[in-house]
Amino acid sequence: MAKFYGEGLPHCDVQALSGKLLVIEGADASGITSQINAIKSWLENQGYSVIDVGIKRSTLVSEELIEAQKSNTLFHTTMSLFYATDFADQLENKIIPALRSGAVILCDRYIYTLMARDTVRGASPEWLEKIYEFALIPHLVLYLQVEPERLVERYFEKNLRLGYWESGMDLGLAGNVFDSFILYQKKIKEAFLELRKKFPFHIIDGHLSIEEITIEIQKTISPILDSLNP
């Protein structure tokens, strides 16, 4: 049966949530989107109803959040609450209705990415846990672990330049964006591993080929889907 981390959202009967909530976590350029697309196709080919969600996809605040990031002027606490609002809107209006219908939800990152980023920027873990106590506990969390030195290569391959936020430039870690990216991503990895002590993740080696990772994910989630009838 589905559960919330805390009191959860009001008027939500968790016993009515018959679907499965599956999360793939990891840093930017770790290959999450490719795996979400591959697993979604695999599940749909088996007859499952699949909904994919992710960070900054809320119809309520996603556009405003993207615009706010472009200015690079928001305080860290304000940005944290912006992301929490984005997540809350998707939870209430996308994730819970889909789970109620018996669908499989594939999350391109969840609250753990938000908590890791905020922790690196000085937020209290206790404060973050309080903010996200309304979140549903996923049936499975997979973490694609990729070393920062490989991440920067992938990021350049995809984007040709390193992003301001993805490099942690707001933290003043280094005098140039390349070194800042490496240092920031190391801190993000450390934050994820610290979170894993309280929120269990299944770690997958993100240095494997796309096909090998897909097979590993399929093997891991298959037992969870046994209770669903496609």
Image (tube, helix red, strand yellow):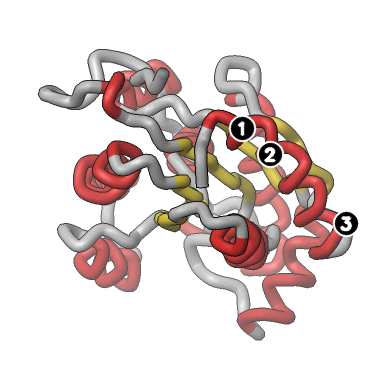
**Residue at 39% across / 22% down in the picture?**
2
Estimate the x, y position of residue 148 in percent, counting from the top left: 76, 54
* Residue 105 in view in this figure: yes
Instruction: Determine the CA span between mark 1 and mark 2.
Output: 7 Å
> Upstream in the sequence, badge 1 or badge 3?
3
Provide the residue designation for mark 2: 222
Residue type highlighted by circle 3: Leu
Out of 59 and 156, give the one closest to the viewer.
Answer: 59
**Residue at 41% across / 37% down in the picture?**
19
Are the residues flagged by discs 1 and 3 in contact, CB closer than 8 Å?
A: no
| Rendered view: 207 above or below 217 | below
Q: Image quarter for residue 13?
A: top left
Provide the residue designation for mark 3: 208
Residue type highlighted by circle 1: Asp
Residue type highlighted by circle 2: Ser
Name the mark on residue 226.
1
Mark 1: give few (<14), some (14-19) or many (20+) Cα within 10 Å. Answer: few
Q: Name the element at disc 2.
A: helix
Instruction: Determine the CA span between mark 1 and mark 3.
Output: 27 Å
Out of 168 and 44, give the one closest to the viewer.
Answer: 44
**Residue at 59% across / 46% down in the picture?**
24
| Rendered view: 179 above or below 222 | below
Image depth: mark 3 or mark 2 in front: 2
Q: Image quarter for residue 132?
A: top left
Out of 133 and 40, give the one closest to the viewer.
Answer: 40
Image depth: mark 1 or mark 2 in front: 1
In the displayed structure, does residue 42 sit left or right of residue 219? left
Estimate the x, y position of residue 220 in percent, counting from the top left: 73, 37
